[in-house]
Amino acid sequence: MSAERIDRFQQIAATNRLALPPATLEQIARLDTALQHWKTPALMREFGTAFTRTWREITAPLAPPQRRQFAALYLAQKALAIDDVLRERSLTPALLARYPLALDRLADTLEAMPDPYDFDDELFIKDLRLVLGLGVPAGACILDIRSRMGGTILLGVARRDPLRVLRTGGKIPCFRLYLDPRYREAFNREGMIDYYREAGELLVHHPDVYGFVCKSWFMDPQLERVSPRLAHLSTIPLSAGAFVITRKASDGDRARALKTSPTRRALHEAGKYEPRAVSLVWPREGMIRWAMAQRQERKA
């Protein structure tokens, strides 16, 4: 990390430390010992029972502003140790090159002190995964490098690779896509090609990972018809070995699919489009082959 960023996070830590009771500060070390191992497959909000319990025990006596200050202090301290964390994650040069901007955005967030910003807030959770080297900035979106499968996704994988599911007891790590509004400007075709390529390149260094997963309405192949500008999200993976698992959309899925597009809303009202909840699964072999081909094209 650059000296300028070190100074910035040290200042954030110092400012928030002053607002917290000494008894609270003495307990921070408990959090690091309570964290589950980073290779444990887990969904975005899962850091292990011990970590979650310890966080809530420490912050329960604090007033809401102090809880935000505690969150900012902890993230600033973890950001100051990020270089050692990233070395252990075996990240590619392309992904490492994205961390300076991500850290600047994190510092902007901590200096602005959002409200809410605590363990129950999604923005904080994404920032916590960033400094733990679990939610990696990859251009258009976040690349979560140790997510877990469950439900329909695990069943879909089991149909294609039953021996692997049996060997692992269903605890198969995968890469997973998460959106972050701070990366919205890169959420376009070129940004997603970079994202997919960098995910595929990283899979080479993580042989225990099954592949890539994204569970969202926007992975629905129907978008090739109703929202062509978003069709690349699924057509690129599906042309290179991915498969989809489809289920009926929930009210939330439907609302998200229709929220930002008058065209999709009109088609839905006319009975010509029904949003679906789609899980796209891209096994590692196909994604790696595609990523290597993309790398060669960039060199040509």
Image (cartoon, rainbow, N blue to C red):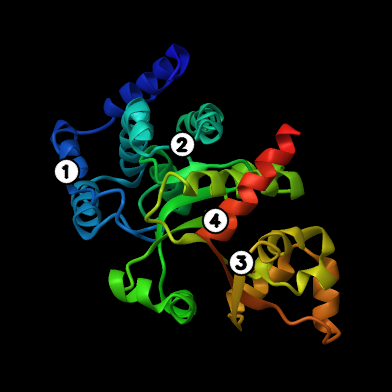
Q: How far from the left and from the top, in percent, is residue 187? A: 69, 48
Real-space CA distance between mark 1 and mark 4, rounded to the nearest whole angstrom: 28 Å
Query: Label 4 near label 1: C-beta < 8 Å?
Result: no
In this rendering, the label closer to the viewer, 2 or 4: 4
Q: Nearer the viewer, mark 2 or mark 1?
A: 1
Q: Secondary structure at mark 3?
A: loop
Mark toward the start of the polypeptide (4 vs 3) = 4
Closer mark to the observer between disc 4 and disc 3? 3
For the point 43% across and 78% down, the residue is 158
Quarter where residue 82 is shown: top left
* Cα distance between the residues tagged 4 and 3: 14 Å
Q: Residue at x 43, y 44 (%)?
A: 205
Residue in view at x 36 percent, y 31 percent: 87
The residue wearing badge 3 is 242
C-alpha span from label 3 to label 1: 38 Å
Q: Identify which residue is drawn at 80% across, 74% down.
A: 265
The label number, if any, that marks residue 230 in the structure image: none
Q: Is residue 122 above or below residue 139?
A: below
- SS category of the residue bearing label 1: helix
Considering only order in the chain, which callout, 2 or 3, is on the residue closer to the N terminus? 2
Label 3 crowd (10 A; few <14 / some 14-19 / many >=20):
many
Q: Distance between the Cα atoms at labels 3 and 2?
A: 40 Å
- The residue singled out by tag 2 in the image is 113
Closer to the eye: label 1 or 4: 4
* Residue 47 to residue 16: above or below: below
Asked if residue 12 can be seen in this view, the reply is yes
Residue 179 in sight in this render: no
Percent x, y of residue 123: 48, 48
Secondary structure of the residue carrying tag 2 is loop
Query: Residue 33: which disc?
Result: 1
Extreme residue in the bottom direction: 271
